[in-house]
Every structure is written in C-alpha cells, then in structure tokens.
Amino acid sequence: MVAVVGSPGRTAQAAETSPDAPSVKLAVSRSQAAGDCPDEATLLQSALELGSPPASETANAGQPLLIEVSFERGDGDYSADLRVSGRKQGMRQLHAAGANCAPVAEATSIVVAMVLDRLPADASVLTLPPPLPEQLSPKPPAGPRASDRQVIPAKLSVRVGVSGGLAYGMLGAHASGLLGIAVHGGARWWELGAGATWALPWQFTYSTGEIAVSAFTGRFDGCAWFTPGGKRFRAGGCAGLWLSALRGEGRGYDHDHTTTQLWPALAGGLVGRLSVAKHWALRLAGWGLVPFRRVTFSVEGVGTAFESNAWAVASELGPELTFE
C-alpha cells in the first residue's frame, strides 16, 4: 500500500498497489511561494507512471518506507529537499531554474520513482541531468555531500526598487530623510547593485544668513545572502562604496554662494528581503559609513558654518520588483 500523507489542512488519501505490497508513505510540503508545485497525489502519480514495480522484492521489502519532500521557491529557481527513512535511508536536494515548478517537479518524481523501484528497463529515457544513482544510499550519510546535490544553474534575476529612510551623520551631526532608487542583479547566493540616494536638505541659521546642506549619492555595492533562495525572508551582508556630493548653499549674506564637495565613504551593512508576492518584495537595509575625508563649508569673514561628520549610519525600506 502506498499512503499519501498531507500536511495539516490537506485531505489524506491512499492508493492500493497489491495485497502484499510494502507500506510506503509520501509526505509533501510546499512553501507559500511554491504553491504551483505538485501535491502528494500528483507527485505520486507522476512517479508511478515512470515504470512498473520490480518482479521480485528484496529481503527487507516488507519494512515501511517514508519519503518526505519539501518544495521551496527562490529568486529565479525552485528547490526540493527529499528525505527517505525506513527500509531505505538518504537525502537529496534538487534545484532547477525557471518561472514555474515543472522542471524541479519532474526531477523530484524521478527520484521518488527510483526509491520505489519503479524505473523502466531503459533508464536513459529519463531527462535528469546529470545521471542519478539507481537508489539512495542504504545508510544515512553523516551530512549532505556534493554528490547528493543535483544542481541546474540558476538564472540571473534583476530587481528594481525604491526606498525611503533616515540617516544620521551624512549632513553633519544631524538626522536627515533619504529617498533612493536602486537596481540589483544576482543569482542564488550573491548580488551586485548600483543606485542613487538623495539626502533631503537640512537648513539652519548661521550669523546673519541661512545655510542649506544636502547630499546626492551614487552607490555601488555587493551582497552575499546568509539564507537560501527558497525562503520567504532572506538576510545577507553587504559592502560597497558611496560617493556623495555634499552641496552647501548660503542665503542672506553679502555674497550668496553655492559650493559642492565630494564626500566618499566605505559602506557596510545588513540587508533583509521579505517576499510578499510572486515578483514583489520589501527590502530593508541598515548601513554604517566611514568617510575618506571631512568636508567644511565656510562663510567669508564669519567662519566655518558646517563640518561633515566622521561617521554616518543610514536605514532604508521600500518595495522591490523582480524580473526573471
């Protein structure tokens, strides 16, 4: 008997094979983003259609067998984690790039069929690159091995986002609002990005006039993800270079004047990405900035009106659209 076991909220069902067939349980779970992956009944049907049961059973064929499958969706790819316990034991992780779950679902049905000994006589008709062994290891491995992972390279994905946030230290020892836009591109574990950020003007009175300071920043960064692509929330670390043009404008003086100076800084921080729909996510980032130089603005005949800070911090939050 092959039993199909659903997660909470699903209907359990069973498919009879023969009176003396061994007991097999198939349990499938799917993340919210991987809802187009097959359920238990569909996956089992696909596996059984790949061939017929063997003519003779092995000595331990009467023992129970549990096959657990977990489907996840990442940025541009799908993955399936398989764990087998009972008379056969082992694990396998499959990845396949694509806009839907079909490629990784097909590969998963092949592995399930192999565990059930349902392969046809000519296994070359199966299209799972690279070739898989005929069955999983008879003993549980100490941990995942390179040979247990069948990987189809993930496609690059491009993400475009806008953000708003707060900074302290970009316009001297004061807080300022931020508006930004950025483009990121990457694969499963990494991404590169470029963008622009505007620090809203800070105005203050100095002597007989008024000073307004603002910053326009070009940004270049690289990030590495700490969590795999199938998770709804991902976290990572980033490093980059921020090139800011600090602009100072004086008003109400004998000679009003505007000046701009370069304020370059090394940046490092943490980033989080929460998927909210198939192509949409919320991106949150926190940054620490260490500038290469200090910038000052002076009023002629009066003195130094502004001096940039020795450090800065910034935070951002905004929506992000993914193109695959």
Image (cartoon, grey):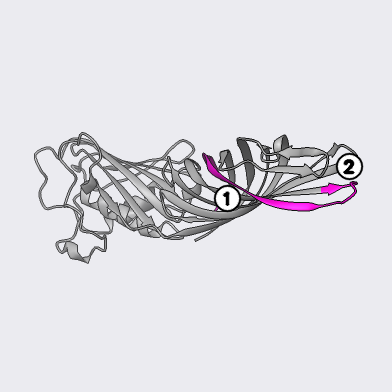
For badge 2, the amino acid type reads Gly
Q: Which of 316 and 49 is in front in this view?
A: 316
**Which residues, given as a range, are shown in magenta?**
250-278
Residue 2 position in % (x across, y down): 28, 44
Q: Residue 277 carries which label?
A: 1
Residue 210 position in % (x across, y down): 86, 42
Q: How crowded is mark 2: few (under 14 residues within 10 Å), some or many (20 or more)?
A: some
Quarter of the image where the N terminus is located: top left
Q: Nearer the viewer, residue 193 or 279?
A: 193
Characterize the magenta stretch by its predominant secondary structure. strand
Q: Distance between the residues labelled 2 and 1?
A: 51 Å
Say if mark 2 contacts mark 1, CB within 8 Å: no
Label 2: which secondary element = strand
- The mark lying in front, picked from 2 and 1, is 2
Give the residue drawn at x 87%, y 37%: 207
Residue 47 position in % (x across, y down): 29, 54
Taking the image as shown, residue 110 lies to the left or right of residue 271, namely: left
For the question of whether residue 182 can be seen, the reply is no
Residue 218 position in % (x across, y down): 61, 54
Give the residue drawn at x 18%, y 50%: 117
For badge 1, the amino acid type reads Ala
Q: How crowded is mark 1: few (under 14 residues within 10 Å), some or many (20 or more)?
A: few
Residue 221 belongs to the span the image colors magenta: no
Taking the image as shown, residue 256 lies to the left or right of residue 199, namely: right
Residue 273 belongs to the span the image colors magenta: yes
For the question of whether residue 50 can be seen, the reply is yes
Q: Which of 79 and 235 is in front in this view?
A: 235
Q: Residue 182 carries which label?
A: none
Which residue is label 2 attached to?
209
Q: Nearer the viewer, residue 90 or 61?
A: 90
Sequence-earlier tag: 2 or 1: 2
